[in-house]
Image (cartoon, grey):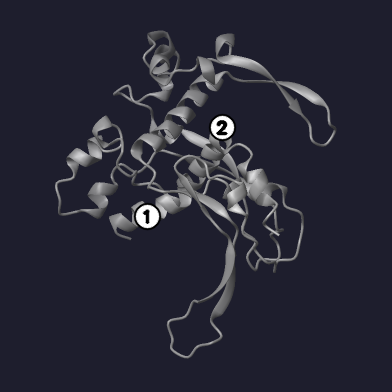
């Protein structure tokens, strides 16, 4: 896959913010079902995104001429997608959010200033419970990682250069399982996954072996001159994790998944 295709592939996946969440509340139903596009004139796309109506088509998956048996029907539910590729700055916000979460919950868990109590209703018992959650209004990434006292507490989280150990920065999330033709997977079932979310910054050297890529390897993802350039070196699982994070943390998307799910009939 060349570099341009990597840009496009990531933008298509990472921008489908409603899709991973929309299926959570689906009822059990037949595996063959029509896909009804949402009447988008009644649901405005989130900022920077466009609406893509769902539908059904027939595709051929064989290169042999005259092979009429190698066709299948594919349905796609309605979703929103970004107008442009996901940038380094956008993906870096995800990485910093995960870093802050790990620091606060693992190393600063006794400091009340980073937490607040929230009321949560148990859907099964309808009982209201009080849970302790991070108070993001109090969290500033740069202030947190530049604080000498905090850095002393998280020293096992840093390498010899004082940078975060990439393998330690992992994100846990859930996603809707694709049933396809597998009868063991129930429609609407979900799975959980833990994935390291740092992009592969060596991708430049790996893909462009005869070019001078040291500048890009060392600076492309980290430094501000490349903030608005498309992020690269992101795997499928990392992009799916980004989708989930973006859907559940941004107020701009709250409620959209609930509206779309009613049209995945």
Q: Nearer the viewer, residue 139 or 99?
A: 139
Q: Residue at x 78, y 31 (%)?
A: 122
Q: Point out which mark residue 89 bears.
A: none
Above or below: residue 247 compared with residue 208: above
Q: From the top left corner, tell me how far across and down residue 111 is, in percent.
A: 56, 10
Task: Report helix, strand or loop for mark 1.
Answer: helix
Between the C-alphas of marks 2 and 1, the distance is 26 Å
Percent position of residue 244, x then y = 55, 42
The N terminus is located in which quarter? bottom left
Q: Position of residue 96 (x, y in %)?
A: 43, 28
Residue behind mark 2? 251
Instruction: Look at mark 1 in the image and give the residue it sits on.
Output: 8
Q: Residues within 10 Å of mark 1 (few under 14, many from 20)?
A: some
Compare residues 217 and 84 and report the one nearer the observer.
Answer: 84
Which residue lies most toward the bottom here?
A: 66
Q: Work out whether residue 49 or residue 243 is closer to the camera in this orientation and state it.
A: 49
For residue 120, above or below residue 144: below
């Amino acid at each position: 896959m060349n570099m341009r295709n990597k840009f496009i592939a990531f933008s298509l996946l990472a921008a489908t913010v409603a899709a991973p969440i929309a299926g959570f509340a689906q009822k059990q139903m037949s595996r063959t079902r029509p896909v009804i596009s949402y009447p988008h004139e009644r649901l405005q796309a989130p900022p920077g995104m466009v609406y893509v109506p769902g539908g059904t088509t027939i595709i051929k998956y064989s290169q042999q001429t005259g092979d009429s048996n190698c066709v299948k029907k594919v349905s796609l539910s309605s979703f929103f997608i970004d107008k442009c590729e996901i940038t380094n700055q956008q993906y870096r916000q995800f990485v910093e959010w995960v870093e802050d979460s790990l620091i606060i919950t693992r190393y600063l868990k006794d400091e009340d200033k980073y937490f607040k109590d929230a009321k949560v209703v148990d859907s099964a018992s309808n009982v209201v419970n009080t849970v302790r959650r991070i108070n993001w209004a109090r969290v500033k990434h740069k202030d947190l990682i530049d604080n000498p006292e905090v850095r002393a507490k998280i020293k096992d989280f840093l390498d010899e250069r004082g940078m975060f150990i990439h393998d330690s920065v992992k994100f846990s999330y859930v996603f809707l399982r694709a049933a396809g033709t597998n009868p063991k997977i129930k429609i609407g079932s979900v799975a959980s996954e833990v994935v390291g979310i740092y992009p592969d910054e060596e991708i430049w050297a790996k893909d462009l072996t005869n070019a001078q890529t040291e500048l890009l390897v060392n600076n492309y993802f980290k430094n501000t001159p490349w903030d608005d350039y498309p992020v690269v070196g992101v795997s499928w699982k990392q992009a799916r994790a980004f989708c989930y994070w973006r859907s559940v943390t941004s107020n701009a998307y709250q409620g959209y998944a609930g509206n779309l799910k009613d049209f995945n009939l």
